[in-house]
């Protein structure tokens, strides 16, 4: 299946992961009673905004929302995509620092980070080009780009939820 | 003169004449006007009878609080321990047990609940920001509502369905959790907020469809929507922490 842990794939990273857990911020989040819950909730909130706003652009690319051009839609929601990407990354890093070995050994964390890296790269490079070049009609490859981006973001959510389940 | 050339001219003339004679599809003017004014959203106008729902709820509550015969009638049903018992009976049912003890199904519902929440709140966020007058200000409110509300409603349906299944799987814990009670109250308030918005200021949308700033009550509805749903997410997540 898709499940793998970073501790199996990159065992040489162990000293770095140990160092992460020893940083003062990691120690703080681990010991403060309120911190982890709050950070995780903000992480989920930011992810909801992220998925919700990419959803709109992707539905536009798929032709399921009409009334705006792809570029207008992407321009309007881009601030949410970028702000929530940043927030998701910051809170995610804080959560990782608080208990790095939990994630290092987790079978769902590996695919989640992999999907996230692909999606973030995709969003910042190829996707922009797709958005810019789909004026007027929406070509088939733009629809495929929208659909695959949508799937990727849902997959990130699913694997992210699975971290807590495994 | 060249006869072939003549024939070509004749064909072009005929073609142009047929273009000129073709009438546009009926209602062209209305369609153009609609697009210009953005007044095409009659479908999402809230019915006036929707007021009956909060009126009934308030009347019911008042009736129980004020009128003694009605109070005695409902006191048994409103006994908190009875709700707890009902939850316990629900928890003992085969459906509840099956969901609770399933290996993956529960996680799929839980994941679906979260994903659907994103599908619901993304477009709702955009509409709220339009009501506040921050984003999509170039578009009429009716257009933003018409394009985004169906997505929100679809997401809401899935959220409610998965949420019900989650509740059925662990009704006693839910009932006893203060966060769950807070969350339900917040959702009720969010519903009331939407109801009041759609049945008052939104009915007179034509007056402020394209003007900025938006009316104060629309801004209040937008800000309330954002705050309440953020609080719902917090309550929902904190509820789960008390479960495990």
Image: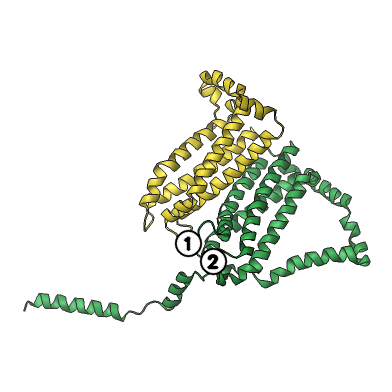
Chain colours: A yellow, B green
Q: Disc 1: which chain?
A: B
Q: Residue at x 60, y 72 (%)?
A: B204
Q: Position of residue A74 (x, y in %)?
A: 45, 51
Q: Is residue A35 above or below residue B233?
A: above
Q: Which image quadrant is residue A164 in? A: top right
Residue A124 at x, y percent in the picture? 43, 41
Residue at label 2? B142
Disc nearest the viewer among 2 and 1:
1
Q: Position of residue B6 (x, y in %)?
A: 12, 78
Label 2 SS: helix
The one of B104 and B183 positioned closer to us in this rendering: B183
Across the whole image, how many numbered discs are drawn on residues?
2
Q: Quadrant of the N terminus of chain B?
A: bottom left
Instruction: Give the side of residue A142 with respect to residue B48, left or right.
Output: left
Mark-to-mark CA distance, 2 and 1: 12 Å
Residue where numbered disc 1 is placed: B138
Please identify the residue farthest to the left as the structure is shown.
B1
Classed neighbour count for the residue bearing mark 1: other residues with Cα under 10 Å, few (<14), some (14–19), many (≥20): few
């Amino acid at each position: 299946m898709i499940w793998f842990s970073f501790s199996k794939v990159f065992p040489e990273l162990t000293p770095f992961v140990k160092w992460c857990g020893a940083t003062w911020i990691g120690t703080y989040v681990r010991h403060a009673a309120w911190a982890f819950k709050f950070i995780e909730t903000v992480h989920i909130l930011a992810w909801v905004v992220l998925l919700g706003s990419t959803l709109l652009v992707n539905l536009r690319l798929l032709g399921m929302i009409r009334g705006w051009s792809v570029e207008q839609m992407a321009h309007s929601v881009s601030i949410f995509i970028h702000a929530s990407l940043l927030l998701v990354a910051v809170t995610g890093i804080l959560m990782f620092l608080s208990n790095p070995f939990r994630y290092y050994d987790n079978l769902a964390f590996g695919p989640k980070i992999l999907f996230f890296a692909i999606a973030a790269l995709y969003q910042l490079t190829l996707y922009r080009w797709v958005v810019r070049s789909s004026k007027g009609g929406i070509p088939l490859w733009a629809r495929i780009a929208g659909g695959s981006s949508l799937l990727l973001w849902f997959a990130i959510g699913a694997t992210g939820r699975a971290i807590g389940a495994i | 003169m060249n006869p072939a050339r003549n024939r070509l001219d004749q064909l072009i003339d005929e073609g142009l004449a047929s273009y000129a004679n073709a009438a546009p599809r009926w209602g062209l003017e209305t369609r153009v006007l609609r697009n210009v004014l953005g007044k095409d959203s009659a479908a999402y106008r809230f019915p006036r009878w929707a007021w009956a729902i909060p009126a009934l709820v308030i009347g019911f509550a008042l009736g129980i609080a004020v009128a003694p015969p009605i109070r005695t009638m409902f006191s048994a049903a409103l006994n908190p321990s009875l709700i707890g018992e009902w939850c316990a009976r629900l928890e003992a049912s085969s459906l509840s047990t099956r969901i609770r003890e399933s290996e993956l199904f529960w996680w799929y519902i839980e994941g679906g609940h979260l994903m659907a929440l994103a599908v619901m709140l993304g477009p709702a966020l955009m509409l709220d920001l339009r009501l506040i007058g921050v984003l999509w200000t170039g578009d009429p409110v009716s257009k933003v509502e018409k394009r985004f509300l169906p997505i929100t409603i679809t997401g809401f349906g899935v959220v409610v369905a998965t949420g019900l299944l989650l509740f059925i799987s662990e009704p006693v814990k839910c009932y006893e959790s203060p966060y769950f009670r807070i969350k339900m109250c917040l959702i009720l308030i969010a519903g009331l907020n939407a109801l009041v918005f759609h049945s008052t200021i939104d009915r007179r949308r034509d007056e402020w469809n394209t003007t900025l700033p938006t009316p104060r009550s629309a801004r209040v509805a937008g800000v309330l929507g954002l705050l309440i749903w953020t609080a719902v997410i917090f309550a929902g997540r904190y509820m789960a922490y008390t479960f495990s």
